[in-house]
Amino acid sequence: LDLAAPGAHQRVNELIASLGGVDAAAVCAGLYVDDPGADWAAEEGVIALNAAGCAAALNAAYTHFKSKGSGRLACISSIGGVRGNGRCPAYNASKAFLFNYLEGLRQNAAAAGADISVTNIVPAYMGDGAGCGGAMLSAVLKGRRTAYMPGYWRLLAAAYRNLPDFMHQHMTRWHYLLLKPFMRRAPRWDK
């Protein structure tokens, strides 16, 4: 489905209906544009897909689960959602939106007494990601709230989230250089 196009919510509803309902749904859509100039034409497309489009799909599935009282909802976001990045402002902001939207849906389900698990899968510099499907599926089946892939990124994300603003502001120049050792050490999930 083209989640960036208008009417994505309705198309997801139609897909769910054509299947006779579903017990689980996973949303995986994203557009990354390296945009250090913060060009609005590029930023708008990223936001349309990563935030609005994903939210439309998540909302359609969530509404279905809420009406039946249970379900498993998952979304693949990104480590980019932890903090902003000057090389791709809209990408990181749109992924941060997903962090908060998923948390809101989880809270809404709890308030309604619905048995809906909402899992935020947060991949981080996984290369081709080959073989990580099993780890993602396991996180969803266990009903985990957040699953970092690879797992050690949970600690790195916490450190990055709490980095003082004056340091983060100047990271654009050395952000990827600093993280490169962690990218190389990313484990292969198919072993």
Image (cartoon, rainbow, N blue to C red):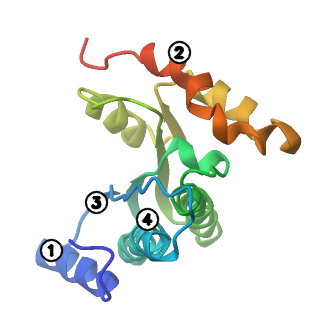
**Residue 121 on image: x %, y %:** 45, 43
Q: Amino acid at mark 3?
A: Asp
Q: Residue at x 87, y 42 (%)?
A: 166
Q: Amino acid at mark 4?
A: Asn
Q: CA distance from mark 2 to mark 1?
A: 47 Å
Disc number placed over residue 23 in the picture, else none: 3
Image quadrant containing the N terminus? bottom left
Kindly report the distance in space between the C-alpha atoms of the residues bearing marks 3 and 1.
Answer: 10 Å
The residues bearing labels 2 and 4 have C-alpha atoms spaced at a distance of 27 Å
Residue 114 horizontal/vertical position (percent): 51, 66
Amino acid on which the number 1 mark rests in the picture: Gly
Q: Circles 2 and 4: CB distance less than 8 Å?
A: no
Of pointers 1 and 4, the one earlier in the residue sequence: 1
Q: Which circle, 2 or 3, is nearer the viewer?
A: 2
Of residue 15 and residue 28, the one placed in the foreground of this image is 28
* Viewer-nearest of discs 3 and 4: 4
| Disc 2 secondary structure class | helix
Residue at 44% x, 70% y is 42
